[in-house]
Structure formats: C-alpha cells, structure tokens
Amino acid sequence: MDAVNRAADLLKHHRESIDRLDAILVFTLAERFKHTQAVGKLKAEHALPPSDPAREARQIERLQRLAEEADLDPEFARKFLNFIISEVIRHHETFQK
C-alpha cells in the first residue's frame, strides 16, 4: 500500500471514530438535558431560582480540572459548559412562567 492509500485509510478510520464520538456526544447531551429538565420542573414546583451560581461555578472548576486531566483545553471546557449552563437556565426559566 502506498503512502497516499495509507493516509486515505487512516483518514477514513479517524472520521469513522469522530462520527461515533459525535453520536455519543449527542445522546449524552440528550440524557443530561432530560435530568436538567426534571431539575427545572422541581425548582419551579418549589419556587426555587432557575440558576444556582455557586453550583455552576463549582461545576465549571470541576470540568476544567477534568479537562486538564484529559489533555483538553480547559478554556474550551469552560466555554462549552457555560454554553450548556445557559441553555439549562433558559429551559428552567420557561418552567417558572
């Protein structure tokens, strides 16, 4: 097998792995949002605020530590979790109305 064919084969395998991982991410996020939806409903039923800044800060710190352990850019992890948290809060606010 020549170098070009080997590269094409490796590229194919990497892309297949990426596709599988993308599916895992989507299903994992869906499962996570099922739980956060339940939390939002519980908060609304008990007149609790839709956000918990102290917990959110702890989670961001935790995720950044995990990112460092996983050799992932902690700043990317922080931005990613902030995006997820903002979506969760947005969903929780809809339950408050």
Image (cartoon, rainbow, N blue to C red):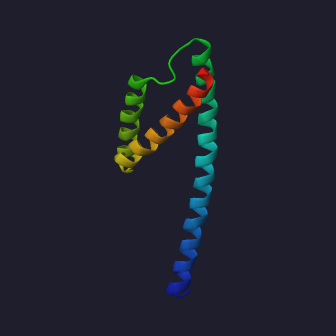
* Total marks placed: 0
Residue 52 relative to residue 21: left or right: left
The quadrant in which the C terminus is found is top right
Residue 63 x, y percent position in the rendering: 41, 38
Nearer-the-camera pick, 30 or 43:
43
Nearer-the-camera pick, 11 or 34:
34
Q: Is residue 3 above or below residue 39?
A: below
Residue 37 relative to residue 65: left or right: right
Q: At x 48% / y 35%, what residue is drawn?
A: 85
Q: At x 38% / y 28%, what residue is drawn?
A: 58
Residue 84 x, y percent position in the rendering: 50, 39
Residue 92 x, y percent position in the rendering: 57, 27
Q: Residue furthest front?
A: 97
Q: Residue furthest bottom?
A: 2
The image quarter in which residue 61 lies = top left
The quadrant in which the N terminus is found is bottom right
